[in-house]
Image (spheres, grey):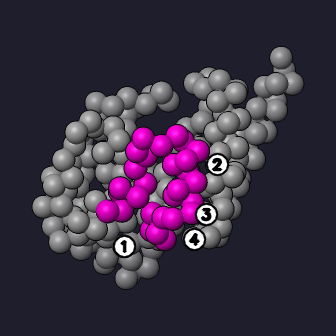
Amino acid sequence: MNDNEKQLLVDLRLAPYIQKATALIGKTRKVGGNQFRHAMATLAILIDYHYTYPVLLKASVIHDLFEDIEGYDPLNIIIIDDDGFDVVNLVMEVTKGNESKVEYLKRVKETATYYAKILKVADRISNLTDLHNDIFDIDYMIKYLNETEEFVFPMALEVDQNMAIEVKDLIAKRREMIHLILNDL
C-alpha cells in the first residue's frame, strides 16, 4: 500500500456503514459464519486490490443489506454522509431483484457501471473461496462455476486484469477439486 492509498483509508469514514452492516450478523451463510463477515471479506478483497474509492468501499460493506434484510430502508444509508446516495445507487446495481440468477448476472454484466462490476467481482471472489464440497453438492458447484465463467469472469476481464486472474484461478481450483471427487466415487 502506498502512502496515498494509506491516507485515503485513514480519511475514510467507514464506521457508520459498518454499524449498518451489523444487521447482517443474524443472516447465516451456508458455509458458516454470517453475511456480515462476508461483507468484511469483500471489503478486504477490494483493499487487497488497492481500491480506495470511498463509495466503492462503503458499498462493499453493505452490498447484501437490501437483499438480506427485508424492507431495509435505503434512507438509513443515504443520510449517513455525502456519499450515502451514491453508495445506495451502487449497491442497488448489484442487488438482485425479482430476476432469476441468470437474468441478474446478465444485467450486471451488460449494464452495470465500472464500480458495480468491480464490486460484483470482489463479491464473487469471496463466494468462490467459500465454495467447498463438504457444504455444497457437486451439481450446485458446477452450476456456480459455469455462471462465474460466463458472467463474472468477463466482467473481471473488463475492469481488472488481476482480479480476472484470481477468478480464473479459483474456477480452475474448484473444478480440479470436483474432478478429484468425481474420480474417487
Measured in 3D between alpha carbons, the distance from the residue under mark 2 to the one under mark 4, in whole angstroms, is: 15 Å
Q: Mark 1 points at which residue?
A: 53
Residue extending farthest to the bottom is 4
Which residue is denoted by mark 3 in the rendering? 156
- Crowding at label 1, few (<14), some or many (≥20) Cα neighbours within 10 Å? some
Give, as a single range, the part of the protein colored magenta.
89-116
Quadrant in which residue 163 is drawn:
bottom right
Q: Earlier in the sequence, mark 1 or mark 2?
A: 1
Left/right of residue 114 with respect to residue 140 in the rendered view = left
Q: Which of marks 3 and 1 is nearer the N terminus?
A: 1
Q: What element carries label 2?
A: helix
Q: Quadrant of the C terminus?
A: top right
Write down the quadrant of residue 23 in the picture. Answer: top left
* Marker disc for residue 159: 4
> Which of the labelled discs sits on residue 148, or is there none?
2
Q: Does the magenta stretch include residue 101?
A: yes
Q: Which residue lies furthest to the top in this view?
A: 185
Q: Is mark 1 on a helix, strand or loop?
A: loop
Q: Where is residue 147 in the image (x, y as percent from the top left)?
A: 65, 45
Kindly identify the residue that appears in the image at 75 percent across and 47 percent down: 172
Q: Which of marks 4 and 1 is nearer the N terminus?
A: 1
**Residue found at the very far right of the displayed protein:** 183
Q: Nearer the viewer, residue 129 or 149?
A: 149
Tell me, yes or no, whether the two marked residues, 3 and 4, touch with CB atoms within 8 Å.
yes
Amino acid under label 2?
Thr
